[in-house]
Amino acid sequence: MSAIILETERLILREFVVEDVDALSKILSDPVTMRFYPAPLRRHQVEEWIARNQKRYQEDGYGLWAMLLKLTGELMGDCGLTRQIVEGAAEIEIGYHVRRDFWGCGYAPEAAAACRDWGFKSLEGAHLISLIRLGNVPSRRVAEKVGMMLWKNVLWREMDHWVMKIDRPSAG
């Protein structure tokens, strides 16, 4: 078991381990959940996703973390922070995915708010963003629930995206 990074009222966020591949595949290989991505991921791509995040933990000190339901310990999503290049600028993105049978329960905003707070406490930078594919209204609502507002539209990875942004709270 890897170390717990964050806890909320109902969730635990921890680093991914190789053994998470089957549970994470239920999310990232689901065509409905991944409809705003180029395609659902195959098992080897989910393994690469976990490895990429493990590398981020080592290099950046953060990445996308496994989201577990505190009550049962079940892995039911991911949420965390990743470095992205958007229009030539380095940004820190809050990203999230929740398994479809847990949609509508408020888990994504709960996890994203914890990651927002962790990001502002632990990282430099004037703001945090979320990159959301145009048309992904549920994901945009999650970003809005944690205080993000539409900053701009961009072409990112050859697809149109909303860039949602929240500024670092001012001290005082």
Image: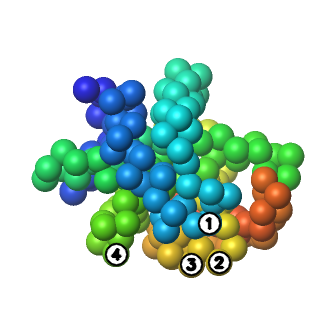
Which labelled disc corresponds to residue 137? 3
Percent coordinates x, y for residue 131 in the rendering: 66, 60
Percent coordinates x, y for residue 121 in the rendering: 47, 42
Does label 1 or label 2 sit earlier along the sequence? 1
Does label 1 or label 4 sit earlier along the sequence? 1
Question: Quarter of the image holding residue 21?
Answer: top left
Which labelled disc corresponds to residue 104? 4
Rendered image coloring scheme: rainbow
- Which residue occupies the foreground of this view, 33 or 167? 33
Disc 1 + disc 3, Cβ < 8 Å:
no
Q: Residue at x 50, y 75 (%)?
A: 138
Q: Which element type, helix, strand or loop, lies under badge 2?
A: loop
Does label 1 or label 3 sit earlier along the sequence? 1
The amino acid sitting under disc 2 is: Gly
Compared with 135, 108 (above or below) is above
Percent coordinates x, y for residue 99 in the rendering: 37, 60
Q: Which element type, helix, strand or loop, lies under badge 4?
A: loop
**Where does label 1 land, which residue?**
36
Percent coordinates x, y for residue 114 in the rendering: 39, 53
Count up the numbered dots. Answer: 4
Mark 3 neighbour density, 10 Å: few (under 14) some (14–19) many (20 or more): few
Report whether residue 170 is seen: no
Q: Residue furthest left?
A: 71
